[in-house]
Image: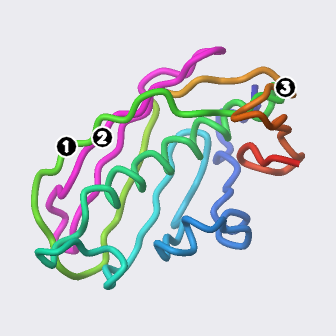
Amino acid sequence: MIAVAMNDAPEEFAPMLNAQRDGWNTAMELRYVSATVDEVTAEWTVGPQHLQAYGIVHGGVHAGVIETLASVGAALNARARGQSIVGLENHTSFIRAVREGTLRATARPITRGRRTQVWEAAVTDPDGRIVATGRVRLLALEPEAAVAGETVAVKVGSPGPRAP
């Protein structure tokens, strides 16, 4: 468990996440605003890669961002035990269509157990209106567990799993 003194702010991981973006985060141009064990917030500016045929942000983008933020938050919580995180379920609802602007998503935990975590998130438009909401259920894997045939190890300082 990550220990935090009552008056201390939780450790901030956004700079590290922005410096070590993976392929999906880079492709989506996702920028972490803040990332702690209690809340993960990111933004992205709508571009052509986010749009579906009608010119609105593709629902998969919203679902992917929601799952990404929930996974990062869950991984930050599980890393002290050497556990890695995988998603089990993602339920995303699309509330309002959007074509442009900078969108912001924030994820917070509902429950953080030793084996499973549930996180919820909301995506908002530049006017603060809800665009999408979601809930993600995640499984905490024991150290050195195999995922899709590869052993997953949590690196020290890493917010989540990476295959060696």
Measured as percent of width and height from the top left, residue 48 is found at 31, 84
Q: Are marks 3 and 1 in contact (CB under 8 Å)?
A: no
Q: Residue furthest front?
A: 149
Camera-nearest residue between 36 and 159: 159
Q: Do the residues labelled 1 and 2 touch (CB within 8 Å)?
A: yes
Q: Which amino acid does label 1 sit on?
A: Ser
Callout count: 3
Badge number at residue 134: 2
Measured as percent of width and height from the top left, residue 3 is found at 76, 31
Name the image quarter holding the N terminus. top right
Under tag 3, what secondary structure? loop
Camera-nearest residue between 113 and 154: 154
- The mark that comes first in sequence, 2 or 3, is 2
Residue 127 magenta-drawn? yes
The residue to which callout 3 is attached is 143
Residue 82 magenta-drawn? no
- The mark that comes first in sequence, 3 or 1, is 1
Q: What residue type is labelled 3?
A: Pro
- The mark that comes first in sequence, 1 or 2, is 1
Q: What residue type is labelled 2?
A: Gly
The residue to which callout 1 is attached is 93
Residues shaded magenta: 110-137
Question: Measuring 83% from the left and 40% from the top, which residue is drawn there?
Answer: 154
